Image (cartoon, coloured by chain):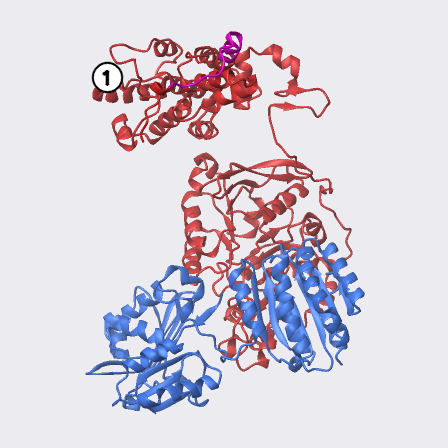
Chain colours: A blue, B red
Amino acid sequence: MPRRKISEFRAKQMVANALHAEYTGWSIVSDVSLKDTLEALDAKVLYVVKVDQAVKGRFKKGLVLLGIKKSGLKKAIESLREKGYDSFIVEPQVEHDQSAERYLAMTLNRDGTMIAWSEKGGIDIESNQESITSKHLDDKTNWTALAKATKLTVDQLQALHVMLQENHISFLEINPYVSSEDGIKILDCAIEVDDAGAYFTHAWSERDIRSPKSGKQYEEEILVRRLNAKSPASFNLSVLNPDGAVFLLLSGGGASVVVADEVYNQGHGKQLANYGEYSGNPNQQETEQYTSALLSLLLASKSKKKVLFIGGAVANFTDIANTFTGVIAAIDAVADSLRDQNVKVFVRRGGPRQEIGLAKIESALEAYGILGSVHTPETPLTEVVRLALEEIK
Amino acid sequence: MDIAKLRRLSTSTIILGSHPGIVQSILDYDYMTGREKPTIAGIVTRGGRRTERYFWGETEVVVPVYASLSAVSEAKRKEINAVLHVQSGRRVLEGMKEAFDMLPKLKVAVVFAEQTPESHSLELGKIAKKKGILMAGPASVGIVIPGVLKLGAIGGTQHPQLVSARVFEPGDTAVISTSGGMVNELIHTVTGSGLRISFGLALGGDRFPLTSPAEAFLLAEKDTSTSRIVYFGELGGQDEYEIAELIKEKKITKPVFVYIAGTVADLFEIPPQFGHAKAMASVKSETASAKKQAMRDVGATVFDSFSELAPALKELASDRVELIPSRLIGDRRKFQLISHLSGDSLTGDVQLLGRDLRETVEAHSYASLVLAMLLGEKDINAPRLVEFTDYVLRLLVDHGPYVSGALNTIVSARAGKDLVSSLASGLLTIGPRFGGAINGAAGAWLTGVSSGSDAKTFIRSQAGVIQGIGHKKYRLDLPDPRVSALESFNIKNGRYLTFARDVEAITTGKKANLILNVDGAIAAILLDLLESELGYGPEKLRELVDIEFFNALFILSRSVGFTAHYLDQRRHDEGLFRMTPEDIRYLG
């Protein structure tokens, strides 16, 4: 759905390919690829091993291991796996002159591609913002001047631009690279792709996409991701605080953020257990699965007080009676536990067949003894959030 | 494009893709605004159906379905000025580019799909701007202009929802939102506060919306019916800075009420991806807090909580008399199980072709009644066509006991089966090799003439046998007398028969018995007469081929022959039919 990072390994391969530069590296995502890499490594060379999972500030977090020998690779990988990561990149360790590090970026924006470059590349680029020059690429672009400024050739720059345009790449950053008589060396590189373009390119695929989160994923998050991949409707769920007090079962990309905002604005941000939403008129079974995943997180929370807010804005086409039937089925399965934990449930929702959906859920919650209150769109969305928050004060 | 122009538009919409719920809600809106007919001119979707049934108020209406935009007649395409694209994100670029090319009067389009590639949106946006087309999306629930237009799910997909959203009576508050759910919430908040909307526009939550928030603000500024703007934005992107700049430069002067969602992201080092594609702040300026501040700095009313919006709007509302839609829809909606043209007994009397059964029957000859019913026409004013049909019905009545269908009837009759079973066994034999060639021939002549190519090119394009050509016995020097008789009905310069004769001229050059046969001649002459006397164009004729109209005459006529064979067998009562070993070649 949004712009997403792909692995450093794939990014470097693509860039090297476009620049006709040499690249040596291995990607390790499994025991099989670990074995293959070990076979390819040279016992006399020192290697660098990095977590390849779109994590920012890897050096500071100790996710880059330097001077690794072939014999030490397995152990190095194991030590990183223990920290919860599962995707790595291995490259020969190369010495280079740090003062020659350069920065280059290309970004897709509304008017086309913006190119940005600096002679002062490297990890401190953020503090060297003023050294960055940027320009729009269009028919009038003076490529020769750009080539001179970036120490790349016109062909190389244009090849990068074509690579962006043809492969649904929204953002490319090569930082740093070193250009010398020996050619171009790409030391680090990041690519953000537009994942809606996956169907139209062979340069990268869904498998290359890396999530910025650490390897530690809740079972419920994985389940929801799978549900999302299978369904034409959309589902997402992120655990923010596993021992939180406020659980949200939300619908709609916009309204869900409004609700989360309100929790934060009312000073309960730290107690917010999750963010997530479903939209696009999912069927009963799907909403049941999604709700079950959320309820399992709720029941596992160590918080003494817990509240569940169900709802969203006035839906355009999501059938409220249908989706709520799924929600009720999931609640029904754990209703006793919810009552034992003294959970209260608040509902506010509008949309197609809202009368049926709201009436059903109200009588179900009442029967289970976990009813907070149920509201039609006549009550503003955020008012009901406030009512729910009263419960945990 | 501006909103005022859309208000004056006589809307004619094509739906690209299938989404019955949304289509019905647009029809409901049209009906409730008091329109005489729906704004939807057709649906383009694959799946082989010609029509889809919907409700118009509480009665049914049929909406035409086309397999592609090119299947819509050119005349009709020239009337289309609105498009609603409800196919998948992959198909957005391809589908909309085709719409741009084929719909010269297109003024407004909505793209519903999520997951449209960014570069595709950018490309479409450029073309739309050049052509002056207002576009909303991708991932937009649409545009609503009270009393005029509802393009998309916006406002709701059920008619009671539309009533409670109060989107029939025009007002002076523009609602602009990047979120589909929230646009509806905003509309409810605005109208619930006593105000009414001048228009509602869902831009979609993608990074590069086809109409940007700033452009939408300029639309509202230009629109003289609008006196204030209510806006819902989100974290991510830089759009709100553009709006702030416009306010600063006094290009936006109308009061602005803003909610920007996503302050919750401040809680996290790496925030989760929020609901919409662009809702991710990668730099500080893209956070909700920073954007809210920028809007505040230029004097916009910015709300921290959504709850503050309704009271603020209430202060602006004056007392008003609640207006209801021109027409309401009751709950007595039921799809009829079968739709039909041929008979109708709603009044208790049996009706046929729109009139009392007896009256109709007495006004028609048998052939004209058959023709009217088979064509689904109430009145047939086509004397020559009726005469020809009568002749064909007589001509095809029987061709002796030798042919497959008659033989099967006879075999069944002699096995002691009843009339209906024996007749059915004969009828079930009719197909591509026996009796079913008229339809195939009609399809061939139609294809040949429509393609505009000459007979030679046509023959080359046909793999194998051309239906309607070739006879076992008759040849060039021994013409089929029935074909000559049929030809006396032909009109002058009938283009289908001319084409069939052109084809024959070439095929007989190869082999003397590849002449135009009875099936081919009937097909060609029927096509010519349907065209000249009833004004049927190629599209309509193609429909007749697709529904097997041309075979119907053979089936009807030959039923008499089969029935006669049955009765004949029963009269003679020859006993069970059995083959002898001499008739069978043993391959073992």
Quarter of the figure with the C terminus of chain B: top left
Q: Is residue B231 magenta?
A: no
Label 1 is placed on what type of residue? Ala
* Rendered location of residue B295, percent (x, y): 58, 72
Nearer to us in this view, B204 or B294: B204
Which residue carries the number 1 mark?
B512
> Which residues are the magenta region?
B564-580
Q: Is residue B71 visible to the viewer in this orientation of the structure? A: yes
Q: Residue at x 27, y 26 (%)?
A: B455
* Rendered location of residue B378, percent (x, y): 58, 20
Task: Report the side of A5 relative to B199 (left or right).
Answer: left
In the image, residue A162 sits, relative to residue B263, either above or below, namely above
Q: Secondary structure at mark 1?
A: loop
In the image, residue A193 sits, relative to residue B362, either above or below, namely below
Q: Is residue B255 visible to the viewer in this orientation of the structure? A: no
* Rendered location of residue A210, percent (x, y): 44, 74
Identify the image quadrant of residue A269: bottom right
In the image, residue A212 sits, relative to residue B314, either above or below, namely below
* Rendered location of residue B152, percent (x, y): 58, 51
